[in-house]
Image: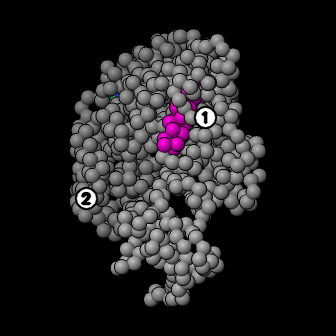
Amino acid sequence: MNIYSDIGQLKGVGPKTKDLLNKCGIYNILDLLLYFPRDYEFLNSVTDLNTTNENEKFTIKCELLEFKKDIRTKTGKVLTTLVFQCNEQKILAKWFNQPYIKKNFVLGKKYNLVGKIKKNGTFFEVINPVAGCEDLAQSKIAPKYSLKDSLSNNIVVKLINQILDNIIISENLPNLIVEKYNFVSLDYAIRNIHFPKDRDSLNKSKKRLKFQELFTYSIKIMMLKQHVKSSNGIAFKMVEELKELKESLPFELTSAQSRTIREILLDQKKPMPMNRLVQGDVGSGKTIVAIIAMFNVVKNGYQAVMMAPTEILANQHFAEVKKVLKRFEIPIEILSGSTKNSEKLRIKEKIKSGESMIVIGTHALIEEDVEFVNLGIIVTDEQHRFGVYQRSKLINKGKEADVLVMTATPIPRTLSLYLYGDLDISIIDELPPGRQKIDTIFFHNRYRNKAYELAQNQIKDGRQVYIVCPLIEENEALDLSSVNKLYDDLKSTYFKGIPLEMLHGKMNGKSKEDVMDRFKKGEVKAIISTTVIEVGVNVPNATVMIIENAERFGLSQLHQLRGRVGRGSHKSYCVLIAEANSNVTKKRMQIMTQSNDGFFIAEQDLRIRGAGELFGIKQHGDSELILANIIEDSDILRIANMEAKKVINSNCEADKKLCSEVIKNLQKTSKYICFN
Ligand code: ADP
Ligand code: MG
């Protein structure tokens, strides 16, 4: 069996299952092998039914005593009941609307039933148990996979079993390392991460795989750094006009901004490509830093490109860059999803011919066939996703170009060294003067009307309001506020007669732009939105940010959203509405109401949720780290980093081969746990 074969090669995978697997990002055998369980069910076999509880599932080893007659319940369901015997105790197994289930059983035979056990008066019962499932019988720990649509856990289990039965996974860590840390083999680890023999083998497998992730990650980063340092860059000079630009700004740069700009200009002077990360809290003024960096490159005769994660933000940057650089008459273009095709062609032509000097756009800009004549700098704004893959892709786009990455998600310095070892880091740790502190208030769901009253009053005073919800459409399963429903509700109540609009990712580019434009002009007074407005949006007259179901968002995300207000001279408010039932939610809301410091908040967030979620990696499914959490596993990260360094500096043939394997895969998103 070839691990790169299409998933359709497996027995039992027809077009429909294949489609479902594809939806989960599984295309080949390796993808499935590396589709690790999201969680496990620890199934304890019971010997005494009295010792069980109702919250956990158990495996009941029992014998079938009796078939009861099916009955119809009051609600019209068919109830099938079978009586089993388990160590002298009787237990009723009940199924609803599955009369055919009886066919699977024979009187007097032994079965494993898996389910939650309830005590009902004097006897025990188990509702809709899974019976006699071989896979569950093999292992007392059952894997639970993330599933989409009608893909069932059982299918995934079966297919992975099929693969494991047909392959042997060869070892790919240097022997010395495996021995030194007493790691289990890769083959063992992969088998036991799916179907653990017991808790101990699960833990050992996790440890081995986490090490493997962080080790490979470290090697990649180090190789990337070597690659960058050894490539030729362009030595830009500092142009005269920089002074004129700075003097023409409507404000004075903060000292943190000036320091960062100095660091960037020094990088630009060097004959190797810049590779710098600028971290700065929301509102610290990163945009102007990027504009100055691009300006210097352009005045050296090279092109500059700036990418934003959303169209809204790209539009805003475009307007800002044009405004700031107006007097210098630099040809600037915007390319985004909503640009008309004919227009796109025209702009691409201009970029190719070198007529356009600054290009603003979304990430599509770098994916698409946009060709530059002489690209000097690539700026990515609000880049939370720091995959090595993305980074290396960027670098490859303009081989000699400088790379400047800006983020408002700060991470602790010690960790950034390991995670972004290939990047130089500048920190803007100062807000422009005169910013008003944003008052953050937390309201329990019950008191949400208070939030809307506050919004009403602010609108009466001429201000504007954002309301953010986690979902677009109403979802019955999850009782969350949705954009659509809230819009309907508020339109007829608190916001009657007030110009209110919706904004979400499912709208087309043109309508989004239109709503945003009218909001900027002050025609629209309130926007109900998803997190599309999370990053970067700058409307100084907006003073209220209401966040519905705030418990659903990460702290850094809440902080980002909050950063949309407090951008002008008016007093601003952030209102968090949540169902604060759990202590964790209360604690998190408290952190938000008490702190305005992005670094502090990010650190708390990392502790509570892990890096994957913080950087939005998990949601996007392009994680480099599947199992490892950089805070929880910082010990493993440290060791992995140290071992990676040794391997890179080693002269031994095997180590060299390992490095070249990693380099070969640098450009692939393919998971690197198996790189042979
Ligand atoms: P972020 O770091 O969140 O991207 P922006 O670059 O959008 O922040 O800047 C936020 C606002 O602060 C903008 O309106 C910008 O014009 C303004 N700004 C930036 N630097 C300064 C400064 N030194 N003094 C005053 N206002 C500034
Ligand atoms: Mg910004």
The C terminus is located in which quarter?
Answer: top right
The magenta stretch spans residue 260: no
Residue 215 place in picture, x, y as percent: 54, 28
Magenta-highlighted residues = 200-219
Q: How is the image coloured?
A: one colour
Q: Residue 444: which disc?
A: 2
Residue 135 place in picture, x, y as percent: 60, 58
Distance from disc 1 to disc 2, alpha carbons, whole Å, reads: 51 Å
Residue 652 place in picture, x, y as percent: 66, 14
Residue at x 45%, y 43% (from the top left corner): 613
The N terminus is located in which quarter?
Answer: top right
Seen in the picture, residue 524 relative to 419 is either above or below; the reply is below
The magenta stretch spans residue 215: yes
Residue at x 52%, y 55% (from the top left corner): 140
Tell me the element at label 1: loop
Query: Which amino acid type corresponds to the residue marked 1 in the rendered image?
Result: Ser
Q: Is residue 151 visible?
A: no
